Amino acid sequence: MTMGGSTHFSVFLLVAIILLCSSSKTVNATCYASEKQALMDFKKDLEDPYGRLLSWIHDVDCCKWEGVVCSNRSGRVIQLHLQRHDPEIADFGGGEILPLSGKISHSLQNLTHLRYLDLSLNDFSGIPIPSFFGSLRSLRYLNLSGAGFQGMVPYQLGNLSSLRTLSIGGNPSDLQVDNLQWLVGLSNLEHLDMSRMNLSTASNWLEVITRLKAHCPELIHLNNLISLNLQGNHLNGPIPSTVGNCTQLEHLSLNDNALSGSIPSNLGKLSSLVHLDVAGNKLTGTLPESLWQLPKLEVLYIADNLIEGVVSESYLDNLTTLTYFDASGNSLTLKVSASWTPRAQFVTLGLGSWKLGPQFPIWIRSQKILQYLNLSFAGISDTIPPWLFNSSLDTVYLSHNQIHGGISHILCEVKNENQVLQYLDLRENSLSGEIPDCWMNYPFMYHINLNSNNFTGSIPRSLFHLEYLDYLGLGNNSLTGPITFDFVNHE
Ligand SMILES: *[C@@H]1O[C@H](CO)[C@@H](O)[C@H](O)[C@H]1NC(C)=O
Ligand SMILES: *[C@@H]1O[C@H](CO)[C@@H](O)[C@H](O)[C@H]1NC(C)=O
Ligand SMILES: *[C@@H]1O[C@H](CO)[C@@H](O)[C@H](O)[C@H]1NC(C)=O
Ligand SMILES: *[C@@H]1O[C@H](CO)[C@@H](O)[C@H](O)[C@H]1NC(C)=O
Ligand SMILES: *[C@@H]1O[C@H](CO)[C@@H](O)[C@H](O)[C@H]1NC(C)=O
Ligand SMILES: *[C@@H]1O[C@H](CO)[C@@H](O)[C@H](O)[C@H]1NC(C)=O
Ligand SMILES: *[C@@H]1O[C@H](CO)[C@@H](O)[C@H](O)[C@H]1NC(C)=O
Ligand SMILES: *[C@@H]1O[C@H](CO)[C@@H](O)[C@H](O)[C@H]1NC(C)=O
Ligand SMILES: *[C@@H]1O[C@H](CO)[C@@H](O)[C@H](O)[C@H]1NC(C)=O
Ligand SMILES: *[C@@H]1O[C@H](CO)[C@@H](O)[C@H](O)[C@H]1NC(C)=O
Ligand SMILES: *[C@@H]1O[C@H](CO)[C@@H](O)[C@H](O)[C@H]1NC(C)=O
């Protein structure tokens, strides 16, 4: 591609104007010639179809280049912010921001003061994570998530003893790890994201994580591991009970693995824990009592395991901060009194497959910010209470119960201007009467499943005014008109 001299000139002028306009905010740190050269060499090996590095030109101080941050005091390059912003979010009407790709020059090694390196969401497919990253000894933050790197993660990263954040997971990646021993060298680590990497052959993950934890008591006066994300890694075996040693842990994601055994009761020692996700494993046994004593817990995802036992109101009432709770797909029983009003306000409540019925759980009426409710397969043999849809709910699963009675009056008598219901699954119940004809009151509906009930009458016209509808299931009812009706909008 060639450009006319005048284009070059106007690009330069534009950059100069932008820099002039913003110069009042920047401090006069001038970059080192050797560091500028290192960055120029780095740029030379990159492909930059979007022109994100357009400001990286020789005549401009590299401390003023896009994505480059220098120390105000020393003028050294200390941060490189080269992540691609999520195209879904950062679409300014100008189309998709294209990723950087190509090779990563060894010249980066000359940025000896670099503390922060973010290359996430670019496209370095085909190359491994450069092992020389292990020599960037000042690094505190390294984010390579979703950047397409392939091959073995270099154990040299274990030399980054100042590292606070290491993020190399994220998207399903082709990165491999056969051994996690090097992690033990990261003694200052606070945030570790190695999600969705397939650690199934890292046979010593348990031992290493345990040793990371074992560091924790000593690290109380350094820093501690605050977040650990190992979701989607084909991990197996039990959750080590030494997990309880890491009392600073705030965020623990071990979901979508093949972990077995019961949830260790030592988990109750993690008094800083805010987010716990162990959903989608093979965990068995009962929930440890200590779980209900975590004073800061806001997110508890344990869905789709083999956990059993009884959860009583006193347990749930202990977790007053709990806001996102999904425990569907286990063999749990809820035991609460008829007059119970939970102390917590949930946004997400997943109690699918719990033994809840036969009555509809009326305590849900107290939930003022509830958006997601799953009460499928919950043994409910009752009518739907009229207040259910006069609420903030956007997603409702009530399938596979013995719910009876009509729904027309329930849906149509709601006078809620801010109706946000989008997803309604009532299939496999014993609901009867006519299909409601007030769907214009629910303009955001995109999924309605009324299959396998006992609805009668005809298909109401207002259904066809739902602009976003992409699934409508009316099969296995006693409707007049089409006997079986399954409507999928492919637009
Ligand atoms: C440098 O100083 C400016 C202005 O005070 C400030 O906005 C900026 O964050 C500082 N940069 C660093 C890396 O500390
Ligand atoms: C680092 O800088 C030195 C001195 O400026 C230079 O000789 C060397 O080639 C650079 N190394 C890399 C890998 O760019
Ligand atoms: C790493 O980058 C991804 C994508 O830009 C971002 O979503 C994630 O929060 C970052 N991780 C950390 C620990 O900062
Ligand atoms: C870590 O650095 C030391 C020197 O400080 C070096 O001897 C060793 O080979 C490095 N280890 C790795 C794994 O890069
Ligand atoms: C995970 O890695 C192992 C060893 O390379 C491989 O056998 C297995 O198929 C991988 N699993 C998935 C789901 O990719
Ligand atoms: C970790 O916790 C276990 C049991 O909770 C304890 O026996 C062990 O001494 C702890 N490890 C360290 C290093 O403190
Ligand atoms: C509720 O929390 C308190 C204090 O953390 C604890 O003593 C009590 O045993 C907990 N109750 C239940 C039922 O877990
Ligand atoms: C709701 O709960 C049921 C029963 O456990 C489960 O099969 C279903 O996947 C859950 N729905 C969602 C969206 O998680
Ligand atoms: C719905 O809820 C609002 C406020 O929560 C209440 O004022 C109203 O009476 C309720 N009932 C109906 C049928 O809209
Ligand atoms: C539907 O209604 C018929 C007749 O009233 C009844 O025999 C049948 O059991 C009902 N089916 C269901 C699933 O409730
Ligand atoms: C209707 O019922 C039959 C038999 O139970 C089932 O196989 C079919 O999937 C159902 N159809 C719908 C649309 O739910």
Image (tube, rainbow, N blue to C red):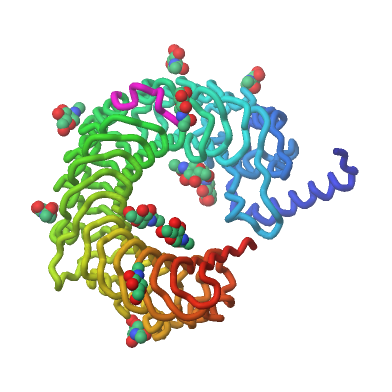
- Vertical arrangement, residue 314 with respect to residue 288, above or below: below
Q: Position of residue 21 (x, y in %)?
A: 68, 56
Q: Main secondary structure of the magenta part?
A: loop
Q: Quadrant of residue 233?
A: top left
- Vertical arrangement, residue 407 with respect to residue 143, above or below: below
- The one nearer the camera, 233 or 409, is 409
Count of numbered labels shown in the rendering: 0
Res. 304 in view: yes
- Vertical arrangement, residue 261 with respect to residue 423, above or below: above
Is residue 13 rendered to the left or right of residue 238?
right
Residue drawn at (24%, 64%) of the image: 344
Q: Confirm whether the magenta stretch covers residue 200.
A: yes
- Name the quarter where the C terminus is drawn: bottom right
Is residue 278 rendered to the left or right of residue 335?
right
- The one nearer the camera, 356 or 264, is 356
Q: Confirm whether the magenta stretch covers residue 393.
A: no
- Vertical arrangement, residue 462 with respect to residue 297, above or below: below
- The one nearer the camera, 145 or 4, is 145
Q: Position of residue 488 (x, y in %)?
A: 58, 63
Residue drawn at (47%, 20%) of the image: 156
Q: Look at the image and give the residue range highlighted in magenta.
A: 198-207
- Name the quarter where the N terminus is drawn: top right
Q: Quadrant of residue 109?
A: top right
Res. 137 in view: no
- The one nearer the camera, 385 or 245, is 385
Residue drawn at (42%, 32%) of the image: 163
Q: Position of residue 46 (x, y in %)?
A: 69, 32
Q: Position of residue 108 (x, y in %)?
A: 60, 27
